[in-house]
Image: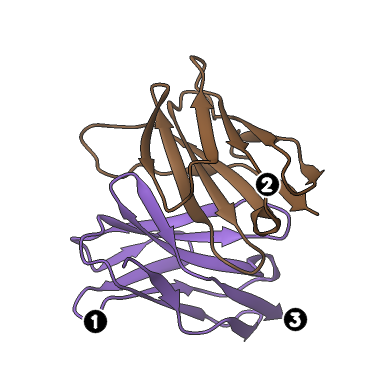
């Protein structure tokens, strides 16, 4: 079946350091891969997406890498800030359906 | 602020009851998707509505049903509530484009449903 999973449930990072969140996926037919940030009491917030025919995409302080050979997706956050503390989900889109992974909690230490 | 609103914010029901959750999509968006998020887990796709018709469904029983109205707002109805239905229910709106298989979904804050 289709599934998206994460290797690390919790990531603790020092403020100012870079964060890397990893995700494994299983559906080779997915069109897009997306990273969401979810803060307590809020819905998921779009961070960045990458189309399946790309291997890297950069945004503001974030970079997403896609390795289709090993079905691996990662999100890199540069100079992590206290406001980055949240749960991060990767999701894959096959047509109009999003399949989410279980999430990684990022804790930023001052 | 995404512009997607949901009501109510919180709701408590008992087993066997029925519930209706509401979602107003972001201005200009014609597609609404509903997700169930259990505590500590990622959202699970329930179904999507486009042009007032169901356009894809996840692995949820028929007692989960929905509607979309001409103004693109939507309702999620759950009949015969079970304890396991306790979760955060999220709706997400997007603009469907025929030239692109996936369109960015903007999520609302969710409705927290507790079934006792």
Say if A101 sits above or below A44 in the image. below
Q: Residue at x 69, y 37 (%)?
A: B18
Q: Which residue corresponds to mark 1? A: A70
Q: Which label sits in the foreground, 2 or 3? A: 2
Quadrant of image for the N terminus of chain B: top right
User: How far apart, in angstroms, are the residues tagged by discs 1 and 2?
Assistant: 41 Å
Q: Which label sits in the foreground, 1 or 2? A: 2
Say if B51 sits above or below A6 in the image. above
Whether discs 1 and 2 lie on one chain: the answer is no
Residue B87 position in % (x across, y down) = 67, 55
Determine crowd level at label 2: few under 14, some 14-19, many 20+ residues with C-alpha closer than 10 A.
many
Q: Which label sits in the foreground, 3 or 1? A: 1
Q: Which residue corresponds to mark 2? A: B81
Q: Which residue corresponds to mark 3? A: A110
Query: What is the letter of the brown chain?
Result: B
Disc 2 element: loop
Foreground residue, A99 or B103? A99
Using residue B16 as the reference point, say whether residue A22 is left or right of it. Answer: left
Disc 1 element: loop
């Amino acid at each position: 079946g289709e599934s998206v999973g994460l290797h690390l449930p919790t990531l603790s990072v020092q403020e100012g350091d870079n964060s890397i969140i990893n995700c494994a996926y299983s559906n080779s037919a997915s069109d897009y891969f997306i990273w969401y940030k979810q803060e307590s009491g809020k819905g998921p917030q779009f961070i960045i997406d990458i189309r399946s025919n790309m291997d890297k995409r950069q945004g503001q302080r974030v970079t997403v890498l896609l390795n289709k050979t090993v079905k691996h997706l990662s999100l890199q956050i540069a100079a992590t800030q206290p406001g980055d503390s949240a749960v991060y989900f990767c999701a894959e889109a096959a047509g109009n359906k999003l399949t989410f992974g279980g999430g990684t909690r990022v804790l930023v230490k001052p | 602020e995404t512009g997607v609103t949901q009501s109510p914010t919180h709701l408590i029901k008992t087993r066997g009851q029925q519930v209706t959750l509401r979602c107003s999509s972001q201005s200009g968006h014609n597609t609404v998707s509903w997700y169930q998020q259990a505590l500590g887990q990622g959202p699970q796709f329930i179904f999507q509505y486009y042009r007032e018709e169901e356009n894809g469904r996840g692995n949820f029983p028929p007692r989960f049903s929905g509607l979309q109205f001409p103004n693109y707002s939507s309702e999620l109805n759950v009949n015969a509530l079970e304890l396991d239905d306790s979760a955060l229910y999220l709706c997400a709106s997007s603009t469907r484009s025929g030239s692109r298989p996936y369109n960015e979904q903007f999520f609302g804050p969710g409705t927290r449903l507790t079934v006792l």
